[in-house]
Structure formats: C-alpha cells, structure tokens
Image (spheres, grey):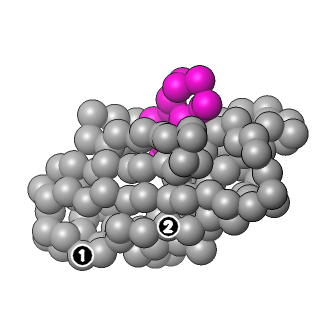
C-alpha cells in the first residue's frame, strides 16, 4: 500500500490562496492516479480533484476555475493550488492515490488515503 503525507494546510482569509502538497512512498513503483478529497464539518467526503499519470484531470464543479491540481510523477508527489478560497472550502483535505494494480470504475475510487490536513477559510 502507498503511504501518503500531506502538508500545506492552514488558516487563510476568504479570497486568499493555499498550496497543498502530498508525497507518496512505499514499495509500490506504479501509481496511476492521485487526487484530493475533502470533508467539511457535518458533511460527507467529496472528491475535489484528481489527476492521472497521463495528465487527465477531474474537478468538482464547486472548485473549477479556482483550484489546480498538478503532479510530479518522478517524485510521486501531487499538489493542489487553491485560489480565491471561500469559507465553504473549509474542510479536512485528504490526499489519495490509486496503484496501477487497482481496478477503478470511476474517478472516485482510491485505495490509499493520507491522514488529512486542515484548511480553514475565514470570512
């Protein structure tokens, strides 16, 4: 299984920016996709964005035009640039990875999860 460590969360005012990073490690040498879920207080987990090793991306409608995902395949790292942040973006953000051996039926399927990093946007 892949181990994931997130960094870059924190407190920011509405309209501000944050950049999250996630580093993958472990015995695996093949990761087909990485992404970010989030969970706001009292709500279920939501897939925010994801990217494949080939560069295909997915964005939730709520973050299109504001968030950008990028990936360094060689370093096994994924980044989330979040601009124009809103109070409703407040959540714990989880990094995700899908190994090449995993069977995925949709963008939502990820076998590995990080511990999460808190993002708080004040109004």
Classify residue 19 by image quadrant: bottom left
Q: Which residues are magenta?
A: 48-60
- Quadrant that contains the N terminus: bottom right
Location of mark 1 (residue): 11
Label 2 belongs to which residue?
A: 6
- Prevailing secondary structure of the magenta residues: strand
As drawn, 27 above or below 69: below
The residue shown at (79%, 51%) is 28
Q: Nearer the viewer, residue 52 or 86?
A: 52
Where does the image place residue 94, in percent across and percent down from the top left?
54, 63
Asked if the residue under mark 2 is in contact with the one under mark 1, i.e. CB atoms within 8 Å, the reply is: no
User: CA–CA distance between discs 1 and 2?
Assistant: 15 Å
- The answer to whether 85 appears left or right of 89 in the picture is left
Q: Is residue 26 above or below residue 108?
A: below
Image point (26%, 60%), residue name? 18
- Residue at 49% from the left image edge and 48% from the top image edge: 78
Q: Secondary structure at mark 1?
A: strand
Q: Residue at x 42, y 49 (%)?
A: 79
Q: Nearer the viewer, residue 93 or 99?
A: 99
Disc on the earlier residue, 1 or 2: 2
Residue 28 to residue 3: above or below: above
List x then y, in percent, for residue 114: 61, 67
Residue 7: give x, y in percent of width and height: 42, 69
Residue 50 within the magenta-colored segment of the rendering: yes
């Amino acid at each position: 299984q892949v181990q994931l460590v997130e960094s870059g969360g924190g407190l920011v005012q509405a309209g501000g920016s944050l950049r999250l990073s996630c580093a993958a490690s472990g015995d695996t040498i093949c990761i087909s996709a990485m992404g970010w879920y989030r969970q706001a207080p009292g709500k279920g987990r939501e897939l925010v964005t994801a990217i494949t090793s080939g560069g295909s991306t997915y964005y939730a409608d709520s973050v299109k035009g504001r968030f950008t995902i990028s990936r360094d395949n060689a370093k096994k790292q994924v980044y989330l640039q979040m601009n124009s942040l809103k109070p409703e973006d407040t959540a714990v953000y989880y990094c995700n990875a899908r190994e090449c051996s995993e069977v995925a039926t949709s963008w939502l399927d990820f076998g590995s999860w990080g511990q999460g990093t808190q993002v708080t946007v004040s109004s």
